């Protein structure tokens, strides 16, 4: 259902969207995370009287939440503590910025071209993030757009946003069922051997001398299975290589770990995983991460398949020019059934 884009009245009621990181949380634990001062007995009363709803329906404390669902939060009395994931007031500049990111728009979903350096969701010290500005992308809908997956702050490229709760559920299932094919571009230091192949190497979070990091581990019992297809599109005399990467799994920092620790070719600008070896003489020594979500192919909620591509971002163009790389790789994984 659509209506004009007037702001919602200030009734004290909040509509909060369940993020990918909160999927499968019990509703009561979701409230505990966001509103720690809310007593459980008070929450139960709000649930019994129908004041708390999920996607417009009555809910119980034990309901398992799904990505993209809308939680109605009524006035809770005492003000809750500041929430880093909360929505921020939108300026005209924010609205114009967000709408300029739209690569594709239809009745069910939006696909954005996220710039490097913009966080997808909030957190400690993150005042400006994409989720906090999604109201700019209502385009006349009553429902607030919902994230269905995420990209790291420093990764650019295609990002899918659902426009309705039904589309969010459909797309969430598609991502979990590995029906979505994502292709990334990366500029790495050196050249992988062999030039193409499949990485099947588990990773896990560990405390290291340089802080908390994802690292390659011996087996799946010690970490999570992580699978990536890769191919070398072009190479510059072994100094640098343009890789196309297709993750089959979606582990935290998977592509960065696989490039640096498995292939021995850190992504340009990835000081966290490549250290000093992640930079190339002749290029900006403060180069940001050169990892770009180039394209996505996914089942559409209304039927059929949708494919969208994001052009090479501005921060990666100097390196492409420096090495004389092109910009059209076709589909490097066309023959692979992931």
Image (spheres, rainbow, N blue to C red):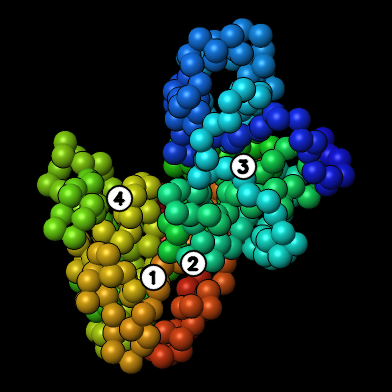
Asked whether residue 306 appears in the rendered view, the answer is no
Q: Nearer the viewer, mark 1 or mark 4?
A: 1
- Residue 222 location, quadrant: top left
Query: Do the CB atoms of the residues marked 1 and 2 lie less than 8 Å apart?
Result: yes
Give the SS element for disc 2: loop
Q: Position of residue 236 (x, y in %)?
A: 31, 87
Query: Label 2 to label 4, Cα distance in Å?
Result: 24 Å
Which is nearer the N-term, disc 1 or disc 4? Answer: 4
- For this rendering, which residue is in front, 172 or 307? 172
Query: Label 3 to label 2, Cα distance in Å?
Result: 20 Å
Q: Position of residue 215 (x, y in %)?
A: 20, 53
Q: Residue at x 48, y 19 (%)?
A: 28
Query: Label 3 to label 4, Cα distance in Å?
Result: 27 Å
Which residue is labeled 3 in the image? 146
Which residue is labeled 1 in the image? 289
Q: Quadrant of the N terminus?
A: top right
Which residue is labeled 4 in the image? 227
Give the SS element for disc 3: strand
Which residue is labeled 2 in the image? 116
Which is nearer the N-term, disc 2 or disc 4? Answer: 2
Q: Residue at x 72, y 59 (%)?
A: 91
Local packing at callout 3 (Cα closer than 10 Å; few below 14, some 14-19, many 20+) is: many
Asked whether residue 65 appears in the rendered view, the answer is yes
């Amino acid at each position: 259902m659509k209506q004009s884009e007037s702001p919602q009245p200030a009734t004290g009621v909040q509509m909060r969207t369940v993020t990918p990181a909160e999927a499968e949380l019990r509703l009561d634990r979701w409230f505990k995370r966001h509103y720690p001062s809310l007593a459980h007995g008070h929450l139960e009363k709000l649930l019994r009287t129908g004041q708390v709803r999920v996607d417009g329906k009555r809910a119980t404390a034990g309901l398992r939440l799904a990505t993209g669902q809308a939680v109605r939060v009524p006035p809770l009395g005492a003000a809750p503590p500041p929430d880093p994931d909360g929505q921020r007031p939108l300026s005209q500049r924010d609205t114009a910025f967000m709408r300029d990111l739209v690569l594709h728009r239809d009745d069910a979903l939006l696909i954005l071209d996220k710039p490097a350096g913009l966080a997808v969701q909030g957190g400690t010290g993150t005042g400006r993030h994409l989720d906090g500005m999604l109201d700019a992308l209502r385009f006349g809908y009553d429902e607030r757009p919902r994230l269905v997956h995420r990209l790291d702050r420093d990764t650019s490229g295609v990002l899918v946003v659902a426009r309705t709760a039904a589309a969010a559920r459909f797309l969430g299932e598609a991502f979990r069922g590995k029906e979505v094919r994502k292709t990334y571009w990366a500029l790495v230091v050196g050249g992988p051997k062999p030039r193409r192949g499949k990485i099947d190497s588990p990773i896990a979070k560990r405390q290291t001398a340089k802080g908390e990091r994802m690292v390659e581990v011996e087996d799946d019992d010690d970490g999570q299975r992580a699978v990536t297809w890769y191919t070398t599109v072009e190479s510059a005399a072994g100094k640098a290589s343009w890789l196309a990467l297709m993750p089959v799994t979606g582990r935290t920092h998977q592509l960065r770990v696989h490039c640096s620790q498995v292939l021995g070719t850190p992504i340009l600008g990835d000081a966290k995983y490549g250290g000093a070896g992640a930079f190339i003489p002749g290029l900006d020594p403060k180069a940001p991460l050169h990892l770009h979500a180039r394209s996505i192919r996914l089942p559409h909620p209304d039927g059929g398949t949708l494919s969208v591509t994001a052009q090479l971002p501005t921060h990666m163009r100097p390196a492409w020019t420096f090495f004389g790389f092109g910009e059209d790789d076709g589909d490097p994984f066309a023959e692979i059934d992931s």
